[in-house]
Image: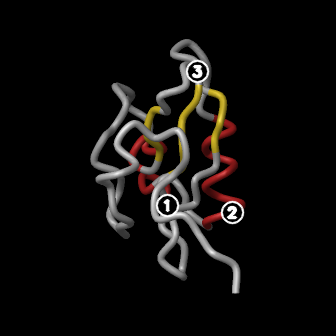
């Protein structure tokens, strides 16, 4: 059986954060729905996916993030890997 992470790597509070099915509580100052599922990494310029997988593990995918860039790659990750979509369009 493959072990999984209970918190994402490079996450600033990885030692205290436990997996949850609720959206991430540390929302980056953005208006996009994707920030309900991503937290800022302690490594500048990156964000970490906080979606809880079926076996109780955090996804932990690290994605490049710049304040001035779009969230298209984050949208794509959530749609393709977690089957999540913008709730405004459901």
**Viewer-nearest residue: 54 or 29:** 54
Q: Is residue 80 left or right of residue 68?
A: right
Residue 32, image x and y in percent? 44, 36
Q: Residue at x 69, y 38 (%)?
A: 73
Q: Which residue is mark 2?
A: 81
Q: Residue at x 65, y 58 (%)?
A: 79
**Viewer-nearest residue: 88 or 20:** 20
Which badge, 1 or 3, comes first in the chain's sequence? 3
Q: Residue at x 69, y 48 (%)?
A: 76
Q: Is residue 47 left or right of residue 31?
A: right
- Disc 1 vs disc 3: Cβ atoms closer than 8 Å? no
Counting other residues with Cα less than 10 Å from the Cα at mark 3, is it few (<14), some (14-19), or many (20 or more)?
few
Label 3 or label 2, whichever lies nearer to me, is 3
Residue 88, image x and y in percent? 42, 52
Q: Secondary structure at mark 1?
A: loop
Residue 2, quarter of picture: bottom right
- Disc 2 vs disc 1: Cβ atoms closer than 8 Å? yes
**Viewer-nearest residue: 69 or 3:** 3
Q: Secondary structure at mark 3?
A: loop
Q: Is residue 42 above or below residue 55?
A: above
Q: Secondary structure at mark 2?
A: helix
Render colour scheme: secondary structure
Residue 64, image x and y in percent? 66, 29
Which badge, 3 or 2, comes first in the chain's sequence? 3
Counting other residues with Cα less than 10 Å from the Cα at mark 1, is it few (<14), some (14-19), or many (20 or more)?
many
Q: Residue at x 51, y 16 (%)?
A: 67
Which numbered marker is on residue 51? Answer: 1
Q: Which residue is mark 3?
A: 45
Residue 72, image x and y in percent? 66, 36
């Amino acid at each position: 059986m493959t072990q999984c992470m209970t918190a994402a790597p490079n996450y600033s509070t990885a030692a205290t954060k436990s997996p949850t099915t609720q959206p991430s509580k540390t929302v980056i100052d953005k208006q996009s729905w994707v920030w309900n599922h991503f937290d800022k990494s302690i490594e500048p310029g990156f964000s970490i996916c906080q979606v809880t997988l079926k076996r109780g593990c955090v996804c932990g995918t690290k994605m490049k993030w710049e304040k001035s860039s779009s969230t298209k790659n984050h949208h794509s990750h959530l749609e393709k890997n977690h089957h999540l979509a913008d709730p405004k369009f459901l």
